[in-house]
Image: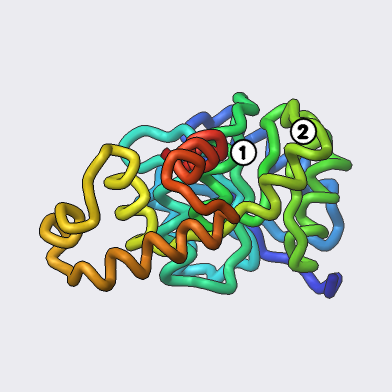
Amino acid sequence: MNLDKIKIIVVDDHPMVIEGMKAMLKQIRYVELCATASNAYEAMEKVKENQPDLVITDINMPEISGVELTSKLKKEFPNLKIIGMSTFNERSYIAQMIQNGADGFLVKSASKEEIETAISSVLDGKMHLSSDAGMSTSEQKELKNQPTLTSREKEILTLISEGFTNPQIAEKLFISLYTVETHRKNLLSKFNTNNTASLIKIAATNGLL
């Protein structure tokens, strides 16, 4: 990791959390907290203004969640690193963040040492999952290796899980039957399975449905 000053923005709707993160980040010599935001709208503006290297965002925010914010930021700023944080360590929250492009996850009670490790890891291109996330090593490995889906694949996966047939999906999404069949094959391949029931089960286990 390049140890020039790393520009970070922290996003959380609780002022006490913001203050706590400020105090932690101040202790990391190569970090510059360039801005804070209390909601996703403010965060988008602050990112445009400050061009940070990393955003640390709460997952559970009103109106626009951290998951949705992550998706929006990654589309507009693909090189931006994002770490989600939450008081909860539920696998579904973590999976949704990763599926939408997050580079790591921290629980809000994380120590200064873990925050520093997380920052260093994601800026080196590695995924960081909190040691307090309550997951076994195999579960963490599974999450890190989780396939990334396009927005269209997510749409089709959801419709498949709701029992729609290929022709019905094609009609609903105004795309060709061939396109739906291709996406379905890609989904089966990405999840390393050959049947729909298994596909839905794996996707649900990973918090994608």
In the rendered image of this protein, does residue 143 appear above or below residue 87?
A: below
The answer to whether marks 2 and 1 mark residues whose Cβ atoms lie closer than 8 Å is yes
Residue at 83% in and 41% down? 114
Colouring convention used in this rendered image of the protein: rainbow
Name the residue nearer the viewer: 172 or 16.
Answer: 172
Residue 71 image point, x, y percent: 44, 57
Residue at 18% in and 71% down? 176
Count of residue discs: 2
Structural distance between the alpha carbons of marks 2 and 1: 9 Å
Residue at 46% in and 65% down? 186
The residue that label 1 is drawn on is 85
Name the residue nearer the viewer: 142 or 49.
Answer: 142
Q: Quadrant of residue 53?
A: bottom right
Q: Would you call the spot at circle 2 few (<14 residues within 10 Å), some (14-19), or many (20 or more)?
A: some
Q: Is residue 175 left or right of residue 8?
A: left
Residue at 58% in and 50% down? 98
Q: Which of marks 2 and 1 is nearer the N terminus?
A: 1
Which amino acid is tagged 1?
A: Met
